[in-house]
Amino acid sequence: MSQSNQELSFPPSTDKIEPERRTWLIACGGAGAVAAAATAVPLLTSMAPSEKARSAGAPVEVDISDIPPGGVKTVEWRGKPVWVVRRTPEMLASLEKIEGQLADPKSERTALPVPEYAKNRHRSIKPEILVTVGICTHLGCSPVNKFETGNQPGLDANWQGGYFCPCHGSTFDHAGRVYANKPAPDNLEVPRHMYLSDTKIVIGKDEKGET
């Protein structure tokens, strides 16, 4: 049974993420929010799953109607920060430009299976909406948004925007695909999800059932 995320508070992870590590990840997400605000990238945060969801690891419903173009809403699902991003046409256009620089541009690796509906260039059901777990696939740090293009600390002049892991320098494009020759071995995880309406999605289940 899914649960509206407005009613939710942090559940203990059903995965093997210790409380201290989860707190740190969320703190990193907060730092990412500050960084996003500093670069005028709209960021919305909703991380309040209920006690019921906490015990059950239930799917989480998310209202996406208030996410502006270029904005991010972060929710917690099973102790993990999950980003819901409304990409702009410019963000989507960048995906093709950098495919030759990626480690797994078609999401063919199997360590983190990708739902069939996300095995495409934009790794999502609808091109403009990305749903991905905000945890680096290297050692579990939380990447930060780096939507601004061009040269900046840790990134070169050809940077097309995406996500940057400050722990060891892994970089990901606007679809969460990792660049080649980086510490992270895989793309960011895309959890099962589905649309309940044009303005609401549920994370943790799809037409095939719950994860």
Image (cartoon, rainbow, N blue to C red):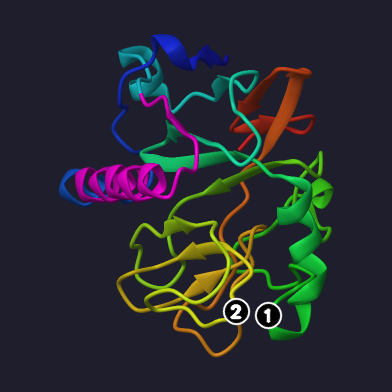
Q: Is residue 157 above or below residue 25?
A: below
Looking at the image, residue 204 sits to the left or right of residue 22; the answer is right
Q: Secondary structure at mark 2?
A: loop
Examine the residues drawn in magenta and state their main secondary structure: helix
Residue shown at the point (34%, 51%) measured from the top left: 35
User: What residue type is disc 1 on?
Assistant: Leu
State the residue position of label 1: 102
Residue shown at the point (68%, 34%) measured from the top left: 193
Quarter occupied by residue 65: top right
Q: Position of residue 157 (x, y in %)?
A: 56, 81
Q: Is residue 87 above or below residue 2?
A: below
Quarter occupied by residue 159: bottom right
Q: Position of residue 182 (x, y in %)?
A: 49, 85
Q: Quadrant of the C terminus?
A: top right
N-terminal label among 1 and 2: 1
Which span of residues is magenta-colored?
23-47
User: What residue type is disc 2 on?
Assistant: Tyr
Q: Secondary structure at mark 1?
A: loop
